[in-house]
Image (cartoon, grey):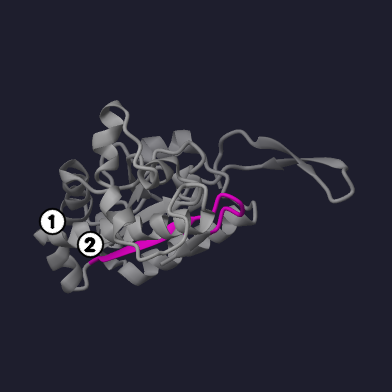
């Protein structure tokens, strides 16, 4: 437990009563290089799932971020690299109940892959030892909806061109517009799978690491209605 000051929080009961509680922030042990090396991709995936369950249930770990900052000054050995959309409604660290030094997070509208993202992933895995790459899409994604509607606007046009192939590859005879929630969901999943394929195709380093079992490259969809991540 942390020697630092306690946090005071207020909780509303089912009857509407407000209760005040004090929580002592935890200072989680920052992983060492040897501890990170002992992790398996499957154990890291399980850790992400367990953290997401805590998030869904409103049981996030109370952390002393000041102390964690001090403990990561001399190095970092995160467990995973997560590629997420920039959407402000997807707080990646909270979604998986992770703290400072736990995960690398890359963010771009529509969670697609480009050269810079690939380089960041190679750094996270090959250089810094992360065990999992997770491409995290989400429901109600504005970038995916814009790609579905083939929006043209400034630099957004070029950005959406990275997502359009995932939309065009879907075999679907119904309404192919952003007004159709079913098709938008299909586009979201297709975009995630395209990103995973792009990682394997365009990064021989990461592909080789996956083939050797050193890492796993997976996808997931964040449900904004529940906070739950559906791992594909």
Q: Residue furthest top?
A: 154
Q: Which residue is mark 2?
A: 197
Q: Secondary structure at mark 1?
A: helix
Q: Which residues are magenta?
A: 215-228
- The one of 179 and 12 positioned closer to us in this rendering: 179
Residue at horizontal 20%, vertical 57%? 198
Residue at horizontal 29%, vertical 41%? 160
Q: Determine whether, in the image, residue 194 is placed left or right of residue 209.
A: right
User: Which quadrant of the structure image shows residue 87?
Assistant: top left
On screen, residue 50 above or below 213: above
Q: For the C terminus, which image quadrant?
A: bottom left
- The one of 97 and 89 positioned closer to us in this rendering: 89
Q: Position of residue 147 (x, y in %)?
A: 35, 44
Q: Position of residue 207 (x, y in %)?
A: 15, 65
Residue 55 seen in the current view: yes
* Residue 216: in magenta span: yes
Q: Which residue is mark 1?
A: 202
Q: Determine whether, in the image, residue 108 is placed left or right of residue 17.
A: left
């Amino acid at each position: 437990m942390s020697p630092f000051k306690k946090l005071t929080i207020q909780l509303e009961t089912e009857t509407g009563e407000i209760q005040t509680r004090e929580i002592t922030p935890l200072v989680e042990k920052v992983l060492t290089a040897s501890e990170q090396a002992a992790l398996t991709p499957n154990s890291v995936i399980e850790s992400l799932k367990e953290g997401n369950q805590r998030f869904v249930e409103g049981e996030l770990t109370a952390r002393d971020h000041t102390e964690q900052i001090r403990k990561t000054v001399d190095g970092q050995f995160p467990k995973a690299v997560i590629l997420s959309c920039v959407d402000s409604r997807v707080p990646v660290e909270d979604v998986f109940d992770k703290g400072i030094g736990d995960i690398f997070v890359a963010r771009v509208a529509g969670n697609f892959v480009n050269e810079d993202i690939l380089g960041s992933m190679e750094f996270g895995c090959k250089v810094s030892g992360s065990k999992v790459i997770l491409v995290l899409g989400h429901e109600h994604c504005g970038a995916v909806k814009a790609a579905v509607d083939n929006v043209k606007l400034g630099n957004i046009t070029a950005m959406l061109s990275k997502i359009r192939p995932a939309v065009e590859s879907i075999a679907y005879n119904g309404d192919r517009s952003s007004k159709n929630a079913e098709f938008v969901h299909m586009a979201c999943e297709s975009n995630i799978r395209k990103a995973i394929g792009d990682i394997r195709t365009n990064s021989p380093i990461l592909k080789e690491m996956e083939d050797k079992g050193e890492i796993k490259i997976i996808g997931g969809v964040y449900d904004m209605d529940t906070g739950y991540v559906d791992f594909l």
